[in-house]
Image (tube, helix red, strand yellow):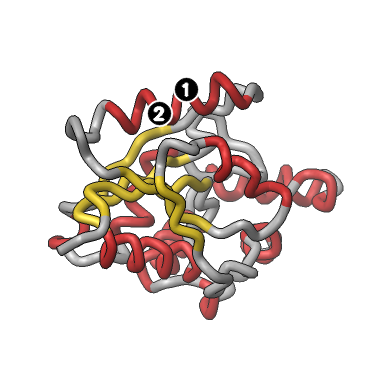
Amino acid sequence: MYKFDYLVFIGRFQPFHFAHLQTIQIALQQSREVIIALGSAQPERNIKNPFLAEERQKMILANFSAEDQARIHFVNIIDVYNDQKWVEQVKQLVNAIVETRSHVGLIGHFKDESSYYLKLFPEWTMVELESLKESMSATPMREAYYEGKIIESAFPEGTIQFLKTFQDSEIYKQLQQKYRAQDSSNLI
């Protein structure tokens, strides 16, 4: 029925937008299970990475039915700034979920030079997507968010609700102050 047992989708999801949603929907059509590798999962927040891994998990799952949620798994990837160590970390965490002799694939889109990591997993079958809404960049979305706006046309409903709730938090206000105090073009 499915082409894959598992499809891995790697991203920071800061925040989770429609192109991410479309990618996971395609992955769910092609794979029995989907593993979302949440990048930048260290417990520190900054302007570029305002949401913790647990918050991103909730944000993402809020956009799927209970049936689909049961097929989605998460692994948290810490930034290590060394491709070899990073790839080893991703594989180790994914392999802890994957059953022996499973057909594993990697789903994504080569949108720019930052997508080079998709080539670092040759043992996984690559499912390369066309642009979808992938031309969407989270950077202007975060900038607008720190300016107090939510670009609702960019986000599914679960993300919108998460962002609205988060805006009321003290953490948001602190991040917003940091954003305003520094040159945003160099930070995001």
Label 2 packing within 10 angstroms: few (<14), some (14-19), many (20+): few
Residue 38: image location, x then y, percent? 44, 41
For label 1, the residue is 88
Residue lying at 58% horizontally and 67% vertically, measured from the top left = 134
Q: Nearer the viewer, residue 54 or 66?
A: 66
Q: Of 151 and 73, which appears nearest the observer?
A: 73
- Picture residue at 58% right of the left edge, 74% below the top: 151
User: Which secondary structure lies at badge 2?
Assistant: helix
Residue type for callout 2: Lys
In this rendering, would 75 be left or right of 41?
A: left
Instruction: Give, as a three-letter code, the residue at label 1.
Output: Glu
The residue drawn where x is 48% and y is 50% is 169
Q: Are marks 2 and 1 in contact (CB under 8 Å)?
A: yes
Quarter-wise, where is residue 48 in the image?
A: top right
* Distance from the alpha carbon under mark 2 to that under mark 1: 5 Å
Q: Is residue 64 left or right of residue 18?
A: left
Residue 152 versus residue 159 in the image, above or below: below
The vertical placement of 9 against 85, above or below, is below
| Mark number, residue 91 | 2
